Each structure stands twice: as structure tokens, then as C-alpha cells.
Image (tube, rainbow, N blue to C red):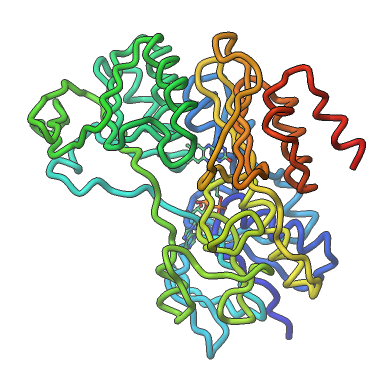
Amino acid sequence: MSHGLVVVGGSYAAAQIAASAREQGYAEPIRIVSEEPRGPYQRPPLSKGYLAGKVLPAALPLRSEAFYRDSKVELILGARAESIDLSGRSVVLSDGRRLAFDRLALATGARPRPLPVPGGGLEGVLFLRSLADADALRTRLAEATDVVIVGAGFIGLEFASVAVAAGKKVTVVEMQDRVLARAVAPGLAAFIADVHRAKGLDIRLGATVKELRGNRRVESVICGDGTSIRADLVLLAIGVIPNVELAQAAGLACQDGIIVDRFATTSDPRIVSAGDCTRHPSAYADQPLRLESVQNALDQAKTAAATISGVAKPYDTVPWFWSDQYDLKLQMVGLAAGHDSAVTRGTPSDGRFSVFYYRRGSLIAIDSVNKPGEHMLGRKLLTARLSPTPEQAADSGFDLQGLMAKA
Ligand SMILES: Cc1cc2nc3c(=O)[nH]c(=O)nc-3n(C[C@H](O)[C@H](O)[C@H](O)COP(=O)(O)OP(=O)(O)OC[C@H]3O[C@@H](n4cnc5c(N)ncnc54)[C@H](O)[C@@H]3O)c2cc1C
């Protein structure tokens, strides 16, 4: 009897592995096991439109109920995969069930990184990863006056935009000397920080948090230099930790992520993995890397599904990401880390421009602000390995599209 495919995880990568496996002709049973009480749903709106009340719950599911029914994909919800029995080829669930498998896919994603300081457990100190987290945050935000966000990454700044727009007094405490330090270059980071400050956000750079104080409920955030900031709501947004424990306990190679090859195969050839939980090779980076993006989860899942279906489809998509803050649409393509020069196309004071990043004369990434056309073109240029010269990129009159046409 065929046991088919078991997918552990309940989000982008899990749903895409199931969908793409069916598209590739995989005909054996498919079961998705998720610890969450609902099927896969979109996370990006949780720090944007959903939090602001502009995206309704009905718009969040990634796939319809009809999809799971018609594709014969069984969803096992509210059950955590506790361990993998490799020799017995089964997964043991928190409710005691044992699911036998022929192929296993791990799409366990990531969880928020905790802040190891006193007071982290006080009421009003929250994280944002799941729909349940977003609901709790939304309720708290409605009642809050003074909001403190620890971490000026994408989630921190997106939440800041929503909280400022809701009329709250909002402070961001960031350890680095700029916002979005892991994601964008200093010039763009300064532009984004200025936009936030102009809206009224108090950004404290180079500042650490040493304690959260309060009597049952959080009342203040104490910084490393002793400064106290009033707070009745604190969002901890200092990054994520990949969920590797299940894989690690089963003996799979892990190193800040489940290690996979270009075909999304783990150190056990029967097991694939995709999404935020993996560390993978990339044609766009010198070292294997871990990406936290919808694009990565979906595209790597397609590769994982192909591998399960016996089709060799290496994962080599150019990485891209987006973020919405106020009326800024930020779109990033490629990996800017390690660039040795950058040029700007367009005028930052107009709020519409792109920054082109180069290494040894070759284009490696483009960050766009309210320039969706340039972002889309950038995806094509980087995928085709086409590089305008820095002079061409900086010249708004130069026809970048023409480069594609000539290629
Ligand atoms: C608020 C927010 C905003 C974001 N905005 C953007 C954005 O604008 N653009 C963008 O590209 N990306 C954004 N991201 C990141 C993006 O959502 C993630 O990269 C994506 O969700 C990764 O998908 P995944 O399937 O790999 O993992 P996850 O989404 O982390 O899902 C993993 C799932 O597996 C479940 N699970 C884990 N372990 C087990 C187990 N042992 N048993 C059963 N179930 C388990 C988890 O509960 C979870 O449901 C955002 C993320 C958040 C939280």
C-alpha cells in the first residue's frame, strides 16, 4: 500500500508543495499536517492591510476548500508533528497518531526570535507571526496609547506604519545604527527612516532593551542606557528562528536552517524541505543562505514537488521581496549584500526611484521605491544576467527595456 507524501507545515511552502506535486502528476495520497487550527493563509497582510482592517479574514486563505477537496489533499489541522521515525518511515503527531509516509516534506517555517530580557512575559508584550498573533495585536492596538516596537526590520516598520496611522505614539528601538540593516543599503535605509520620522515615528537607533517593566501588564521599556520609554503595547520584532528541531532530532543536517541542495533535498534523499526553514545554495549568492520571503517559499516548494515527482528542477529563481509602509511600495530584487557600488535612478525627493547595486561592475540587485515597472524589469534583467552599466542605470532617459529586447 502506498503511504504517499506527508507534508509537515501549514503555510506557503506546504500548500505549494501539495499543489505542485499534483500538477507534476504525483498521484499518491498527500497529507498536510499543521499545528495551526486553520489551513494555509497569507501572512504579509498580517502586518499591513489586515492589521489596518482593510483586508478581511475571508481574503486570507491561500487555497479554497475546493482545492484541497478536488486535489485530494488532506489537511490535518491542530496537530503538531512531534518526531520523525526514519526507519519506520512515519511521523508521530501530538495527538498520538502515527502517519506513515513514502516521501516526507518539511515546510516548518520559522518563529519569532524571543528577546531574552526580564519582563518578556508581561501582558501586552506580543509577537507577530500567525493570524492568532495578528488578532491579539489588533485588539491591543485599539486600546493602546504608547506603542514600542523592538526591531526596525520589515515587520517592525510595517506595524509602525499601521500604529502611527491609528494615531498612537510609537517608538521603535533598534540595536543597529540604521533601520532595515539586514535588508537594504544605508542610503535607502536613511530615506525610509526619514519618511517614518516625518510621519511622527520616534526611531531610536543604536539602542538596546534591557528590561520590560510593569505590574502584570507592560508599562515601560528600559533601554541599555537607562532611558525609560512608556509602553502599554510592545511588539518584539527582532527576527525569526528557523524551525529545525524536528529535522535535527531525526538526524538531518541543519545549520541555522535545514540544509538542502538545489533540488530541495535534505541530507536524507527521501525528505525534501522548502521555505523559511531551509538553508540552500543560490546562484545569486556565494554561500548557502536562508531567505524569509513568500517568493522563496513558493519557488523552492515547486522544486521540492518536482523532486518528489521525479523531475529535476533546480531552484534558481532570483530572490525578490516587497514591503508596504504608508504609501511607500518597496520592492527588492536580487541580493545587495556585498555590493561595491550603487547608483540611483529617479529622484528620491519625488518618492519614486530605484537603487541599482553592483559588484565588480555587474548588476546584483535593485531596490525600488514606488517603481513597480523597474522592479519587474529588474527581475528580468537579473534572471537573464543582463547588466546595464552604472551610467545607463542612473540615466532615467536610458531605455532599460531595450536591453532585454537586444538580448
Ligand atoms: C507579519 C508578516 C508579514 C510578512 N510580510 C511579507 C512580505 O511582505 N513579503 C514577503 O515576501 N514575505 C513576507 N513575510 C514572510 C513570509 O510570510 C514567509 O517568508 C512565509 O510565510 C514562509 O512560508 P513557509 O511556508 O516557509 O513558513 P511559515 O509561514 O513559517 O509556516 C510554517 C508553518 O508550519 C507550521 N509548523 C511548524 N512546525 C510544525 C510541526 N512540527 N508540526 C506541524 N506544523 C508545524 C507552523 O505553525 C506554520 O503554520 C511576512 C511574514 C510575516 C509573519
The residue closer to the viewer here, 365 or 2, is 365
Whether residue 320 is visible, yes or no, is no
Expressed as whole percent of the image width and height from the top left, the position of residue 230 reads 16, 21
* Residue 389 sits in quarter: top right
Instruction: Answer above or below: position of 341 versus 164.
Output: below
Total marks placed:
0
Instruction: Answer above or below: position of 145 versus 40.
Output: above
Which quadrant of the figure contains the N terminus?
bottom right
Q: Residue at x 89, y 43 (%)?
A: 407
Residue 84 lies left or right of residue 7; in this view the side is left
Whether residue 392 is visible, yes or no, is yes
Residue extending furthest bottom?
87
Residue 87 lies left or right of residue 310; in this view the side is left
Instruction: Answer above or below: position of 33 versus 208.
Output: below
Expressed as whole percent of the image width and height from the top left, the position of residue 310 reads 79, 75
Residue extending furthest right?
406
Expressed as whole percent of the image width and height from the top left, the position of residue 85 reads 49, 83
Q: Residue at x 44, y 27 (%)?
A: 189
Q: Residue at x 53, y 42 (%)?
A: 340
* Residue 282 sits in quarter: bottom right
Instruction: Answer above or below: position of 396 versus 247.
Output: above
* Residue 7 sits in quarter: bottom right
